[in-house]
Image (spheres, rainbow, N blue to C red):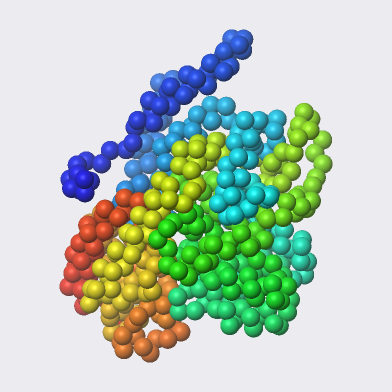
Amino acid sequence: MHGAFLFMPYALERHSLEALRTALDMLERGFAGLPAAATPQLGRDGERVLVDVAERLHDNYPYFHPLYAGQMLKPPHPVARAAAALADWVNPNNHALDGGRASSALEKEAVAQLAAMVGWDAHLGHLTSGGTMANLEALWVAGKLAPGQRIAASRQAHYTHERISGVLGLDFVAIDADRRGRMSMEALEHELRAGGIGTVVATLGTTAVGAVDPLPRILELCERYGARVHVDAAYGGYFKLAGNLAAESRAAFDRMEGADSVVIDPHKHGLQPYGCGCVLFRDPSVGRFYRHDSPYTYFSSAELHLGEISLECSRPGAAAVALWATQRLLPLVQGGEFARLLERSRAAALALHARLAANPRFVTAFAPELDIVVWAPKAASAAEASARSRAIFEACARRGLHLAVAQLPVAFFDHDEALAGAEGASIACLRSVLMKPEHLDWVDRIASILDTATDEAVARGAALPS
């Protein structure tokens, strides 16, 4: 099978088009009693525009292919893509029940399944446009519950936490990270002891290196000092289902239910098209902060609607339909097919990390906790290693392998004496996100291309700045 992937022309998935046609016929029958009305048609001009769109979309990296292993881009499952397209024929708006009756019900069911994965039965939650908006709502509620108190997050947490805190008028404090990219418990306790911290953000899967903050210890410290805990699991949340995590990571995911709020992004590991995040609160009573009166959008909805527990107003019902369909096909259970897909991604990261650690031309960071691998070429200085990383990145791209370059602390790496004097500095390193299950079948090919690209970069070493 591996050879077939390597030598047969790549073909985009098309079977869902036929399945969509069948489902569209079923959808149409549900509205068969409507009187005749004019229906806009695509037409010849529309067909030509679609061809133009396809041509313009060529100007992309092949995000859907296993040789794209750079940023956090994972193709949606065919059922999610088709379900979203099917819903767009109705174009529901999940702001109010009047605008999205069926899709609102599907959203509540899908969100309840995510809450159950966290470990909650009672909860309040809804879908958002992404992790940024989901985290904004969580910190907005945090500010309402602890007015005038600070938000604390690791220096390796996503930069949006500091930005969001500024937008909300909340003071923010950055907590130092340890050599594995996790929040330092000593630094956190120092800040908690000083007082004034209302909420601590624990990240389960940083976007830089996939580090998992030690949630059990964070919960213990926050209980002692009277702070709330928000878990940003936008990237890593689904790994709660994976059966091949290291013990420390497993312990963190097992304590997610102890948090006050959790954010998960279905459009990362949840196989959804972009535009699908989720915010969850353990205490449903925080819904009181969302209360409002609208004189015109809810005239026939006596039942609680999603617009009453969301800062966003209009939201695409198609996102909820797609997520519900995916979770119907791939239930969120440990040991299930969806969980096994996550396990393959982590196995791919561990395999690539082992190959890199055994290569004398590279220095590696700590073993991946999830599915992100970072490494750097050995060089006489941090500056030279950074330049060589960029040269290897470009040489890989010329060979069809797309990685990423990240600026990370030198302290993250098992560096030799050549970089020992660079403590406290940062280095431009290579980063690979192996979030596609197929990546496990492509580790050898990725390593082979990387070797060839490194040969080229080393051969051109005289052109690299020292």
Q: Tell me if residue 320 comes above or below residue 403 in the rendering.
A: above
Q: Position of residue 43 (x, y in %)?
A: 44, 20
Q: Tell me if residue 23 comes above or below residue 428 in the rendering.
A: above
User: Is any part of residue 155 visible from this angle?
Assistant: no
In the rendered image, the quadrant that contains the N terminus is top left
At a point 31% along the width and 71% down the height, the residue shown is 389
Name the residue nearer the viewer: 412 or 58: 412
**Residue lying farthest front?**
335
Q: Tell me if residue 463 comes above or below residue 108 in the rendering.
A: below
Name the residue nearer the viewer: 30 or 388: 30
At a point 57% along the width and 13% down the height, the residue shown is 32
Q: In screen coordinates, is 49 left or right of 167?
A: left
Q: In screen coordinates, is 121 left or right of 420?
A: right
Q: Dividing the picture into quarters, in which one does residue 161 lie?
A: bottom right
At a point 54% along the width and 59% down the height, the residue shown is 233
User: Is any part of residue 4 visible from this angle?
Assistant: yes
Q: Position of residue 122 (x, y in %)?
A: 68, 50
